[in-house]
Image (spheres, rainbow, N blue to C red):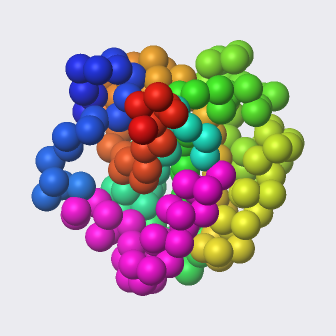
Amino acid sequence: MTDNTDPGAPDSNPDPQAEREIRERVTRLAFGGDAGRFDEFVRVLGDATPAGVDVILRGSSITGHKHGSDEPFDAGGPGTSDLDVTFVGGDMVMLFREFHIPGVHSVPLSEEHPFASPPLAPLRNRLCAMTKRPVNLQATTSLVQYLRDVTMDQPYLVLLRKPKDEEA
């Protein structure tokens, strides 16, 4: 799912029908079918995201089931499944101090790694309160996202694109 302008940028021309289906699934599963709540979630992310960064959502809210199993989203009850948000590009990885790949691919700011990114903790807390579920925030470079896309074939939804100021 990549375009030719930036080998790591999420695809700018995904299949519109597939994207619509994924967006509807996310809205139904994670936001109780309320498109306004979903839009507010994206707006809050957009307000906190600098230019030159894309924001994607991946995980069970995209597929409808837990990775590697058939356990459905929120199998443990409402609000039990998390949302996995990834900031792609820009200098977002610089806001993290815990990494899977140092300086390139962070661990998620999550219940398991509550101090992974102190600057993003207020945003995470706000998103968790808005959604009434855990929201994990992670950052990666465009190259790592591209490699994950090509080698792992994990579906995701592009929530927003924040072009660099000179591209706006």
* Image quarter hosting the C terminus: top left
Position of residue 50 relative to residue 140, above or below, is: below
Position of residue 2 relative to residue 31, above or below, is: above
Residue positioned 71% across, 73% down in the render: 129
Q: Nearer the viewer, residue 65 or 149?
A: 149
* Image quarter hosting the N terminus: top left
Question: Residue 138: x percent and y percent?
Answer: 63, 40
Residue positioned 61% across, 41% down in the render: 50
Query: Per the image, is 147 magenta?
Result: no
Principal SS element in the magenta part?
Answer: helix
**Would residue 122 be found to the left or right of residue 63 on screen?**
right
Task: Tell me which corner region of the image, top left, top right, bottom left or bottom right, holds residue 131.
Answer: bottom right
Query: Per the image, is 29 magenta?
Result: yes
Stretch in magenta:
20-48
Residue positioned 29% across, 20% down in the render: 5
Task: Tell me which corner region of the image, top left, top right, bottom left or bottom right, holds residue 24.
Answer: bottom left
Question: Residue 115: x percent and y percent?
Answer: 86, 42
**Would residue 40 be found to the left or right of residue 145 on screen?**
right
